[in-house]
Image (tube, grey):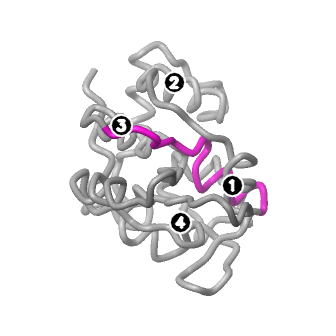
Amino acid sequence: MTPPPFATSPDRRRGRGNRGAVILALLVLTGCEPPPDGISWTLVEARIREAFPGVPSIDTAALSELLEDPARTVVLIDAREAEEFAVSHLDGALRATSIEHAAALVDGAPAGATVVAYCSVGYRSAGLVAELRARGLTDVYNLEGSIFRWANEDRPLYRGDVAVRRVHPFDETWGVLLEAERRAYSP
């Protein structure tokens, strides 16, 4: 199975469209049966590991420690669409508009920087990291659980320079992984 590009269709707006349902169907077709009550973190993480086995990852606690260390430089790449990024993002994150743009961000990172990509749950960003690594770029990591897990753990989120507490829920399928009080709207 060819992984989808990290950016999603511009036709999806505020939960409309069926990308979540398509990805859920792919999970089922590739042997990842959803639990009776729907999608789960266990299912998502298993599918990401299966689809992108060579992609190194970093968990939210380790990223938080890196961001707090003044001796470390961290470059955050947001692989979500513009409307998702506009709701909230990690502090200082740069939104990649294409694989070429993401590669330029990695190439332009200071020597010794840790580059971490994220999206909603980690699937799109894992695809981005896989593409960057296929181009020979190293020292790029996928954030496990991405912004949904980050938000669910009450870690800092921003809209520009303003601290916020809510995240774009992507759609009705994936939005269930984001705690209800963290959703910018109900998908």
Q: Which of marks 1 and 3 is nearer the N terminus?
A: 3
Say which amino acid is labelled 1.
Leu
**Image coordinates for residue 7, horizontal then vertical, percent:** 31, 52
Q: Which of marks 3 and 4 is nearer the N terminus?
A: 3
**Element assignment for label 3:** helix
State which quarter of the image contains the N terminus.
top left
Say which amino acid is labelled 2.
Arg
Question: Which segment did they paint magenta?
Answer: 137-154
Question: Residue 49 got which mark?
Answer: 2
Instruction: Please say if the residues under marks 1 and 4 sit with CB atoms less than 8 Å apart.
Output: no
Instruction: Please say if the residues under marks 1 and 2 sit with CB atoms less than 8 Å apart.
Output: no
Q: Distance between the residues labelled 1 and 2?
A: 23 Å
Q: Distance between the residues labelled 2 and 4?
A: 24 Å
Q: Earlier in the sequence, mark 1 or mark 4?
A: 1
**Element assignment for label 1:** helix
Residue pictured at 29% horizontal, 38% vertical: 131
Q: How many labels, in total? A: 4
Q: Distance between the residues labelled 3 and 2?
A: 18 Å
Say which amino acid is labelled 4.
His
Q: Which of marks 2 and 4 is nearer the N terminus?
A: 2
**Image coordinates for residue 186, horizontal then vertical, percent:** 59, 65
In this rendering, the answer to whether 55 lies above or below 154 is above
Residue assigned mark 3 = 22
Instruction: Please say if the residues under marks 3 and 4 sit with CB atoms less than 8 Å apart.
Output: no
Question: Residue 168 got which mark?
Answer: 4
